[in-house]
Amino acid sequence: MGRYVARRLLLTIPVMLGASILIFSVVYALPGDPIRALAGDRPVSPAVVQVLTERFHLDDPLWMQYWEYLKGLFQGDLGTDFRGRPVLDTIERTLPVTIRLTIVAVIFEIVIGLTAGVLAGIRRNSYFDNLVLVSTTVVVAIPILVLAFLAQLLFGLKLGWFPIAGTREGWYGYVLPGLVLASGSLAYVARLTRTSIAENLRADYVRTAKAKGLPPRRIIVQHTLRNSLIPVVTFIGADIGALLGGAIVTETVFNLPGIGREVFDAIRAQEGAVVVGIVTLMVFFFIFFNLVVDVLYAVLDPRIRYD
Amino acid sequence: MTQFQTDPAPSRATTGATLLEVEDLHVEFRQRSGVVSAVNGISYSLAEGETLAILGESGSGKSVSAQAIMGILDVPPAVVSGAIRFEGRDMLAMSAEDQRQVRGPGISMIFQDALSSLNPVYSVGWQIGEMFRVHQGASRKEAKRKAVELMDRVRIPAAAKRVDDYPHQFSGGMRQRVMIAMAIALDPRILIADEPTTALDVTVQAQVMDLLKDLQRETGMGLILITHDLGVVNEVADNVAVMYAGRIVERGTVDDVFTDAGHPYTEGLMNSVPQVEAKGGRLQPIVGQPPNLAAIPSGCPFHPRCARRRLGAEAAPGRECSIDVPPLRLVASGREAACHYSEEVLGVRAV
């Protein structure tokens, strides 16, 4: 197992290099002039343009620009944006917001999604089961933008339970955006758990557990849940990787300065260094959490061994 | 134990106290498409140390009746009626909790496919030890020690080393031994073995059957062996009940039934087995298909496939095969068969 994890971690290096090259070329290929974009409507003197162009190597060919970037990267320098702020500082400022949002969202997924799925799976075709089926279908069908505004209107404005925007109220401010962000995955977790439980309840080893004279509670908890949770854990793990990539819509609607919104702004401003830095980080999160899922999978299911 | 003998049925080859009495057991599955009658009024009893084989093809109700006895038939919803008396107490009248406590120490069961019947995510030692932890409140350490003992007892080599292995790390025969170890953990009075060797190759089959017989000799438990394998029945069982369409159609000692069948269906089964003496000859299959349990034929359920059926003018009054249901009746000493014309079947030597 240790060797497998080490090999997988080593493999992330070429993947991240490849990803950064790809992102670099796409940013390079964007039409328009970033210096003009920076200046907006004001006139810029040719001297300023020239200085900036040289400082950011904007006239160099792609491979040379990339080489400069890599050289910086190995010294722990992710470059600076056009205003001279280090990209690392930007990440340090925005990432905690996204991490908090992800944590809240995942808690919702686990607490609400898993509980609803387990109960619906155990009592299939019951009133509660139908309620879960209908409500998850509705949630999945509504675009997240609409859900976000609805949540702000209902829980923020009408009921006044939660702040509707910003991070000034600490963790409390993350409840509403976390719930909105989690809604789709939450519905998916509920359905996945339900199906998985219902399937496992028919398994031969559950029949054996009954024949062993085990109490009903133990049959569910020990002999059905653990087996049923394998696909769910896999999904939630991969979802954490995706959520850490930032949620542009949620972060924008709720005015949370996370990395999703930051990268969106950076793309519009053609801030190459910022886009490359953040997107490469997103790729890393995604790869890393996929690795975590693979390891967890082996822990949960002894039939999986990687050596 | 012979002083407890209350039911000296003539068919009994072994003696001992009666452990289990099944009386007029019915099992129905209510489905959207209609009612499926899987078991239609079967009765039998089992004594200490007795091996009763329940023989039948797929869909004859043999597994369903066994699961009804265990009380583990809840998916899909089944309607069970009749009486199942274990040591005199009717299991069907017991509370769910009392019934649960009979499973394990009273009656226990092993299944056909040990790989899917063992939980893949727990070690075999954990699964065997669970019997002691749940039923006797044993500690983890104690349960594990007892699990190793049991694995030794069912002759799993290097039991102490393998106790923490998972089911998929064992061979088919060893997995079935693990199932057996789990089933006999609490010294049950009755062991129901539902096709225990069907998934195994022939040499391993013999080893597993030998093991079951040895364990039975040691503990005196009653063994209900559900199978469609005539060879296994012949080797290990004392008595046999042949099932067809959810009914018992013939019952007697294995020696009697195998030498001279009293029901055309049993006769057909015997004729469909390859025999060394009849080398080169053609096997005689039973024509037709087993009946659909949602629409069992009227009269004798076997009559559409029966070569000896009598219809219309051929039939004796009140004994028309397509109309009158033949009761299971005594047809010779220690022999019961459910056929109007059983006497004509008896005495005809198998081909």
Image: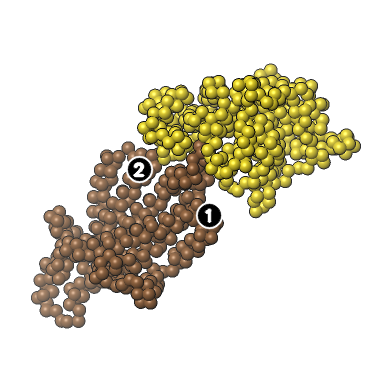
Q: Amino acid at mark 2?
A: Val
Outermost residue, right side = B313
Q: Is residue B324 left or right of residue A248?
A: right
Residue B329, which numbered label? none
Q: Is residue A130 visible?
A: yes
Display colour for chain A = brown
Disc 1 crowd rating (10 Å Cα; few below 14, some 14-19, many 20+) is: some
Label located before the other in sequence (1 or 2) = 1
Residue at 47 percent of width and 46 percent of height:
A217
Q: Is residue B254 left or right of residue B348?
A: left
Measuring from the top left, give residue B193's x and y in whole percent.
57, 31
Q: Is residue B282 visible?
A: no
Measuring from the top left, give residue A248's x and y in whole percent.
31, 67
Outermost residue, top side = B277
Q: Amino acid at mark 1?
A: Arg
Q: Which image quadrant is residue B45 in?
A: top right
Quadrant of the snapshot with the C terminus of chain B: top right
Residue at 53 percent of width and 60 percent of height:
A127
**In the foreground, A237 or B76:** B76
Asked if marks 1 and 2 fall on the same chain, the answer is: yes
Residue A124, which numbered label? 1
| Residue A272 against residue B268 in the figure, above or below | below
Measuring from the top left, give residue A94's x and y in whole percent.
22, 65
Q: Is residue A57 left or right of residue B20?
A: left
**In the foreground, A25 or A94:** A94
Measuring from the top left, give residue A82's x and y in whole percent.
16, 70
Chain of the residue where label 2 is placed in the rendered structure = A
What residue does disc 2 label?
A299
Chain of the residue where label 1 is placed in the rendered structure = A
